[in-house]
């Protein structure tokens, strides 16, 4: 292979990096070794542009059981001797090239990360981003048609793989913006449950212990996925990239999953380590296991079962064929492990052994073709760049939103229906009705709620709540605030279920970090996320970075996605987002309300400022603007979440729903739609703008309902925690009535809400 800069770039290496490899080896690498360095030093495996920033994240806490980056996923103690294992990852570029298989194998990969630790996967969530589904400004009919095709393919892939695998898809979220048209984002999160004392590690140690490859035969699919797709930008229509997308077999993965979980639960003493063959295939799994164990590995590629003729050693080592795992068995239990997998009808072959010498050595029919110290592969260069604020961002942030005309009060109901029908806000039932979300019978609250709630049968009555969130539009306007808001919203969604958020996982989706403006976005977002994690006490226990998300020179919105996990002492007491009964008192809790007090009485008013419209769906849909400067008070956010958890524990709440996309009016409408229960308030004093009060998206706000007899106790709790609140009405009837501005039947609200996405998907 030529060693010129242009050729090296095809495997995601620079000329300087090549010279560094030569210096470290004190020789030139051969072609097989160079291909392995290209994979291991790629952004996807090596995190060379992001690792210095990721160290900002808090990673320890009272529930944390693992070291971030040290295992396949993060594990947190949930009591009763049990732990939750969870992680989120991306499959963005593969899904742009081949949406069904890209999304399907993204699900397969994240599920393997969970059962590689010996945990049983019990839930999948997905966070998706696409370009607009209908033609409009900046979106031609052809681009919109492609976006619809990508959307259908990705949703089909997620459902097709997860349903066959028997793991429920219980939640997630979807957003749309022109920046995603050429480069959709497909992030998948998986949660598993295990006994805390039976977690398996991804490690190789113990000289002479056999290395066993189990699962699918190895083919040429996926070669170059880690560096070709994940470590450089690409352009639309690059059909030559299709072979870099893996092809999944969920039925085989089901057998592999059951075999690995049973191995951990019943025969953990037979093995030293277990590792998924994910990005970079055998290369990354062998190298990472050896490096973690301060050991070496000797592997004979001729022993690797193949489904294609004439594969070279490099192709075998770099193939990303799916449904494969490495088992590092104890020598005395080699036969037991092989028999175990054969009983599950899963192919298992010894392909090498652990050595004391810390080298990765690869043989091809006895010929040594790779000999590199394991830790040289795992220590790529790190780049701490100087970011530059994007040109024009100051203008967007300082846009005078007060210059926009306020909402005509007579148009408030019409505007509410219009917003409910936008794909951004509309019901996502079209998506999740294609997913099995009840399989395994753990699901207490499923898709469509703020957070999914799952019972933990082996630690009954405990449960966990999980949610994903992220707002690329807000991060585009202010990546620091947007990063903080991503953490806050995900944790707030969990708190709305009554669960206490205890940890997060994240997937950082950004453009080319070699561009100073993109690096600035990445750094600012990480700083904001770190600040929120510190304020909320939610360490980052796992995650993924997906950079180079650009197409035709246009980067996606900076989009950090956060998956939050919370703990419920009693899953049966989880809160729903829907109003539960007629006659309940409804409150806006958190920001956006003002207490007006005099000597005799207290009254309340809602506040609405132009600032609250920053980055809102109302501003985008009604005025065609993405502008303003979002912000969040993290101290108030922490008090709000504590209040929600404590109120739920004391049985003071009947429902809770995060006030986010679409603002207060949309939030109340969604609470009504849930069970067909109306809402009314005769008067609602407002200080400021009507549009901002009804449709602004100020942070740290939740709409809750409570029985009238519990209202005094709820108000006392909120006052004790210094959390603002305003009683805003009562549940009941068949309409949503807000003063003189909105009077719409719940059935009409539901019709708009449910038709929005199907209408947008029509060809």
Image: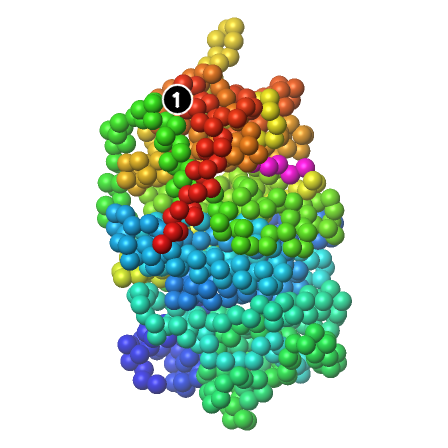
Residue 687: x and y, percent?
38, 19
Decide if residue 679 is in sight here: yes
| Observer-nearest of 470 and 145 | 145
- 342 relative to 31 in the view: left or right: right
- Residue 485 position, x and y percent, is 44, 42
Image quarter where the N terminus lies is bottom left
Residue at left 53%, top 72%? 322
Residue drawn at x 31%, y 84% as measured from the top left: 2
Predominant SS along the magenta part: loop
What residue is shown with label 1?
741
Q: Secondary structure at mark 1?
A: loop
* Residue at horizontal 40 percent and vertical 34 percent from the top: 417
Q: Nearer the viewer, residue 676 or 181?
A: 676
Q: Quadrant of residue 261?
A: bottom right
In the rendered image, the vertical position of residue 349 relative to residue 326, given as above or below: below
Left or right: residue 464 compared with residue 383: right
Near-viewer residue (123 or 674): 674
**Residue 560 shown left or right of residue 362 in the figure:** left
Residue 539 visible? no
Magenta range: 573-578
User: Which quadrant of the view contains residue 756?
Assistant: top left
């Amino acid at each position: 292979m030529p060693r010129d800069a242009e050729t090296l770039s095809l495997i995601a290496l620079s000329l300087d990096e090549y010279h560094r490899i030569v210096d470290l080896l004190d020789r030139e690498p051969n072609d097989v070794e160079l291909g392995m360095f290209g994979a291991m030093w790629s952004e996807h495996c090596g995190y060379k542009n992001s690792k210095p920033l990721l160290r900002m994240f808090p990673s320890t806490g009272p529930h944390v059981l693992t070291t971030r980056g040290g295992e396949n996923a993060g594990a947190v103690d949930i009591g009763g001797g049990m732990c939750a294992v969870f992680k989120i990852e991306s499959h963005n570029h593969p899904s742009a090239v081949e949406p069904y298989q890209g999304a399907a194998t993204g699900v397969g990969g994240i599920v393997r990360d969970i059962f590689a630790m010996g945990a049983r996967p019990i839930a999948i969530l997905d966070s998706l981003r696409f370009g607009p589904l209908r033609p409009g400004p900046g979106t031609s009919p052809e681009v919109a048609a492609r976006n619809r095709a990508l959307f259908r393919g990705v949703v089909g892939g997620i459902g097709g793989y997860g349903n066959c695998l028997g793991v429920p898809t219980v939640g997630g979220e979807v957003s749309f913006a022109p920046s995603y048209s050429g480069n959709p984002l497909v992030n998948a999160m998986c949660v598993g449950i295990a006994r805390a004392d039976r977690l398996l590690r991804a490690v190789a140690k113990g000289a002479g212990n056999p290395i066993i490859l189990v699962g699918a035969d190895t083919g040429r699919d996926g070669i170059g996925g880690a560096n070709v797709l994940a470590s450089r930008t690409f352009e639309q229509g690059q059909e030559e990239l299709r072979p870099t997308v893996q092809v999944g077999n969920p039925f085989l993965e089901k057998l592999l999953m059951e075999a690995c979980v049973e191995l951990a639960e019943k025969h953990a003493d037979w093995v030293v380590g277990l590792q998924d063959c994910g990005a970079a295939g055998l290369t990354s799994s062998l190298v990472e296991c050896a490096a973690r164990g301060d050991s070496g590995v000797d592997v004979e590629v001729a022993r690797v079962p193949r489904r294609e003729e004439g594969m070279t050693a490099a192709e075998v080592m770099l193939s990303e064929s799916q449904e494969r795992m490495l088992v590092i068995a104890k020598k005395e239990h080699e036969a037991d492990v092989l028999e175990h997998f054969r009983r599950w009808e899963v192919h298992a072959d010894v392909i090498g052994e652990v050595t004391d010498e810390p080298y990765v050595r690869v043989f091809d029919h006895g010929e040594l073709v790779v000999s590199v110290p394991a830790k040289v592969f795992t220590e790529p260069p790190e780049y701490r760049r100087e970011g530059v604020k994007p040109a024009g961002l100051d203008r967007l942030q300082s846009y005078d939103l007060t210059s926009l005309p306020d909402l005509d009060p007579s148009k408030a109901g019409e505007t509410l229906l219009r917003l409910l029908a936008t794909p951004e806000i509309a019901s996502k039932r079209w998506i999740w009705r294609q997913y099995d979300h009840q399989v395994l019978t753990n699901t207490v609250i499923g898709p469509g709620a703020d957070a999914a709630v799952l019972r933990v049968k082996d630690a009954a009555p405990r449960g966990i709540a999980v949610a994903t969130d992220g707002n690329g539009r807000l991060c585009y306007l202010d990546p620091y605030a947007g990063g903080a808001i991503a953490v806050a919203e995900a944790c707030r969604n969990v708190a709305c279920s009554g669960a206490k958020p205890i940890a997060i996982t994240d997937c950082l989706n950004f453009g080319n970090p070699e561009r100073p403006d993109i690096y600035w976005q990445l750094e600012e977002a990480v700083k904001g996320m770190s600040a929120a994690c510190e304020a909320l006490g939610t360490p980052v226990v796992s995650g993924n970075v997906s950079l180079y998300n650009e197409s035709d020179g246009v980067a996606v919105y900076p989009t950090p996605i956060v998956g939050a996990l919370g703990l419920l002492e009693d899953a049966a007491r989880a809160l729903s987002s829907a109003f539960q009964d007629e006659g309940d008192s409804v409150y806006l809790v958190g920001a956006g309300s003002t207490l007006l007090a005099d000597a005799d009485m207290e009254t309340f008013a809602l506040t609405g400022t132009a600032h609250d419209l920053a980055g809102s769906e109302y501003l985008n849909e009604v005025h065609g603007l993405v502008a303003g400067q979002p912000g969040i008070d993290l101290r108030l956010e922490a008090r709000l979440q504590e209040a929600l958890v404590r109120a739920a524990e004391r049985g003071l709440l009947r429902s809770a729903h995060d006030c986010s996309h679409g603002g207060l009016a949309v939030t109340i409408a969604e609470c009504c739609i849930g069970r067909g229960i109306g809402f009314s308030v005769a008067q609602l004093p407002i200080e400021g703008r009507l549009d901002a009060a009804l449709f602004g998206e100020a942070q740290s706000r939740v709409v809750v309902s409570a029985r009238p007899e519990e209202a005094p106790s709820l108000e006392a709790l909120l006052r004790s925690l210094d959390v603002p609140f305003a009683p805003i009405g009562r549940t009941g009837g068949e309409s949503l009535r807000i003063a003189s501005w909105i009077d719409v039947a719940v059935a009409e609200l539901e019709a708009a809400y449910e038709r929005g996405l199907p209408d947008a998907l029509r060809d």
